[in-house]
Image: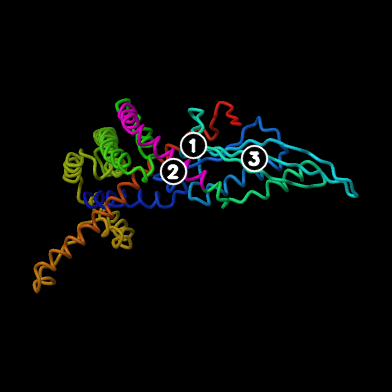
Amino acid sequence: MRRYLIIVFALFLLGNTARSQNSPKLDDFGRIVLNTYLSEQMDIPAEARKLLDTKLSQVTSNYGMGGSSVNPRFIITASINVGTKDIIAGPPQMIAQNLDVTIFIGDALENKIFCNTSLSLKGVGTNENKAFIDALKKINPKNKDLASLIEEGKTKIVTYFNTQCNFTIKEAMTLKEQGKYDEAIYKLSIVPEVCQDCYFKCLDTMIYVYQEKIDKDCQVKFQEAKTIWAANSSSTGAEEAAEVLSKIHPLATCQPAVEEFIKSIDAKLKADEKARWEFKIKQYEDKVAKEKEEMRIAEAKSIRDDEYRENQSQRDAEYREKQAVRNSELDKIRVSAYRDVAVEYAKNQPKTVTYNNIYWK
């Protein structure tokens, strides 16, 4: 049974990493995100609104700042002012419109504009809707004024995170004290990597918050497993307890106590009941065999002395290089685990964000 639990624990961390890698929202963390937003107060035809929304999304995607519900704080939005509207005699009769489209980047939650730029566009169509669409089609996502807007907006957002860093960490620690570990990790995870000082401060804080999260979870699950075993000290009870224990994070500080508990269960099982565990162990061993190579990346790599005897300095250098690779891989796994928590938290938040009827002009 002890071997069975060890195998399950090994799969636990690997499984978390795999889920993170497959998560469609994981990459939204660690970078600056701009969400496209158009106010309901904007009085333009529905098709034109849809096209403008698409154009703004193309602008943010073009500069690697496409948004999602992961962090709804910062937005890119627009307002339209119709300058002139002329009717061109036909047949067919046409409508020509001159539009001034002002595009904004700002903090939607604080209703604060960071920067803006205006584009003068002209559209012609057989009706007003088609004239709007013809004009908006001329928005070039790579327009130099839009490039400058994005760069200025990015700078302002970086400044925001850097100036708010201590407050962000304090807020996360308050959430931790309230037992809201996932929300605390989420708050720390949305700080972009480009804000290096704040990013690493938040990463250090996440380590502390995450450890307390898994330790608290371990206490609950450990107690549940002990209750199950006390009520049914048989192979069935052992299997149920093992199922609960297998969900405990392998880095939780209660692991030594869990190991002792596993030994006590193992000692009480009868020989025929142990045989059932041996069968289960073999099943898990077969399942995990193909994952050994990936697991080895996250494990310490032993260095054979006889491979490096010819040159001690070379051996030391190669060891340091291998150790650096190992540490890098472990860091990636840790960050993925933290962000996986943040992703799940974000997914469970309300899908619609209210921006207090923001309509910047």
The residue positioned 50% from the left and 45% from the top of the image is: 150
The answer to which image quadrant residue 296 occupies is bottom left
Q: Is residue 224 visible?
A: no
The residue where tag 3 is placed is: 101
The residue positioned 60% from the left and 30% from the top of the image is: 359
Residue 273 percent coordinates (x, y): 24, 49
Q: Nearer the viewer, residue 290 or 143?
A: 143
Amino acid type shown at disc 2:
Ile
Element at badge 1?
Answer: strand
The residue positioned 70% from the left and 42% from the top of the image is: 48
Q: Main secondary structure of the magenta part?
A: helix
Is residue 28 depicted above or below 75 in this figure?
A: below
Q: Is residue 170 magenta?
A: yes
Q: Is residue 164 left or right of residue 273?
A: right
Q: Nearer the viewer, residue 351 or 152?
A: 152
Q: Is residue 9 visible?
A: yes
Residue 76 percent coordinates (x, y): 54, 39
Measured in 3D between alpha carbons, the distance from the residue under mark 1 to the one under mark 3, in whole angstroms, is: 20 Å
Q: Are marks 1 and 2 in contact (CB under 8 Å)?
A: yes
The residue where tag 2 is placed is: 32
Measured in 3D between alpha carbons, the distance from the residue under mark 3 to the one under mark 2, in whole angstroms, is: 24 Å
First of labels 3, 2 by sequence position? 2
Label 2 neighbour load within 10 Å: few <14, some 14-19, many 20+: many
